[in-house]
Image: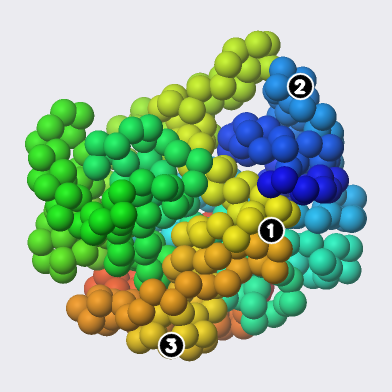
Amino acid sequence: MEGFVMPREKIVILGGGSPFVTALIYSMLENKEVLEGSEVCLMDIDPSRLPLLTKLGRELSNRAKVKMKFTETTDPKEALEGATFVMPSYRIGGEKHMKYDFEIPTKHGICGDETAGPGGTFMAQCTIPATLEYCRLMEGLCSDAWVISYVNPTNFVADAVRRETKTKFIALCDCFAGFSMAYLPYLLNMPPFERRYCDNPDIKPRAIGINHCTWLVDLLVKGEDGYPLLRRKIEEKIGKVPRRPEVDFSLRVLEAYGYVNVCPSHCRMYWEHNTLLEERKALLMDEKKRASVLGWTESAWEFVREMVAGAEYNPHRPEYCFSLHHSRHVVGIMVSIIANEGREWGGVNFPNRGAINNLPYDAIVEGQCIVDGRGLTPVNCGDLPKPLVGLALHLLNWQELTVDAALSGDKDLLYQAILACPYVHDMKAAKKIMEELLVAHAEFMPQFK
């Protein structure tokens, strides 16, 4: 990066009261050579956690001897004024509404969560109006800012934003980041298992498809075809302790299709719906395990307080929010833009336009991109393997109908969108789920009033 002139950025985190902010701060400090001198503004409509996280940012930057300014606000206009990068990182309705998307479909015998099935359709109904409102503010207050979003369901949101606004919107999913930075090195027994980049010198994976249904279509390990090695390593890990059910599932899918699925925990819903449904029902019976897997736990907040008091950051705690792959993904893409790196990143959702030859031209797909000062340049990875195309098209139809409903407020379209999900197999159950979720999420869905 010789000759690089350090800019001063204003980085806004929308949803700045989330425990995930801790990992974002850590990853920004890892990139001090590019980000030093920047302002990080934490914006959240709920002010309760902002002072603690702002204090954490100041504490960690002081310890790292990095000049980085941390501010907080509950006013989105104040936050977005003059922003150069915006990171939407909110969950509309918080943990309470996340549980509705999990519990109500499960009660009626349909598997899913906040990004899949009826829950995914309804999360989109809540998230899309809020995201479009923020994007319209950005068009007036920081029209040249890059938006790097982890807001779910990411492909649905990306579709709505590209239809309705001109925001420079980059939609990410951390499944590929976790797969390439942590899970794939674990499978290949090539430590360190948690890395800073999706594409490393010794492991170069490429995955394409639809969000939460992407497939490893190319793998180089030390410059050679890595698939034979990967198959052997997966077979070796079957039944080993600690047991990871997704490893077993990965092998079954590999045997069936010849490709590794990047999001096995999500895709089990398509191929092992009833088994996973029973696991979800059992989970709902266990009060301790029902606690949010996304980091809204008192233990997580206690650790944040410990860090403010002097404890070291620990990315290996059981709470998912402290893992670094998702933060290194979003911060890494921002750094690639600022420093004009031309680095390849995966897990990016974008309009296809020929990047995946046998999927629709205007579809929102997920794949690989070269990221530099111009933004994203999708990498053409050829065809999605033929046995996987039908499911991808099915998922795209579900996504597009869901976005149609979110933008129109048409309840007939909403019902059709729920029925379009590949594993929704009961019309009566779908209708009951829709009616209950319309009531549960009513305050966040103005389009249906």
Closest to the observer, 442 or 46:
46
Q: Residue at x 49, y 80 (%)?
A: 352
Residue to which mark 3 is pinned: 360
Mark number, residue 340: 1
Q: Residue at x 60, y 60 (%)?
A: 342
Mark positioned earlier in the residue sequence (1 or 3): 1
- Give SS at disc 1: loop
Kindly indicate whether the residue at mark 2 contacts the one at mark 3 (C-beta within 8 angstroms). no
256 in relation to 178, above or below: below
Residue 253 drawn at (x, y percent): 16, 61
- Label 3, residues with CA under 10 Å away: few <14, some 14-19, many ≥20: some
**Circle nearer the viewer, 3 or 2:** 2
403 in relation to 58, above or below: below
Q: Quadrant of residue 40?
A: top right
- Give SS at disc 2: loop
Residue 333 drawn at (x, y percent): 61, 54
Q: Is residue 281 left or right of residue 202?
A: left
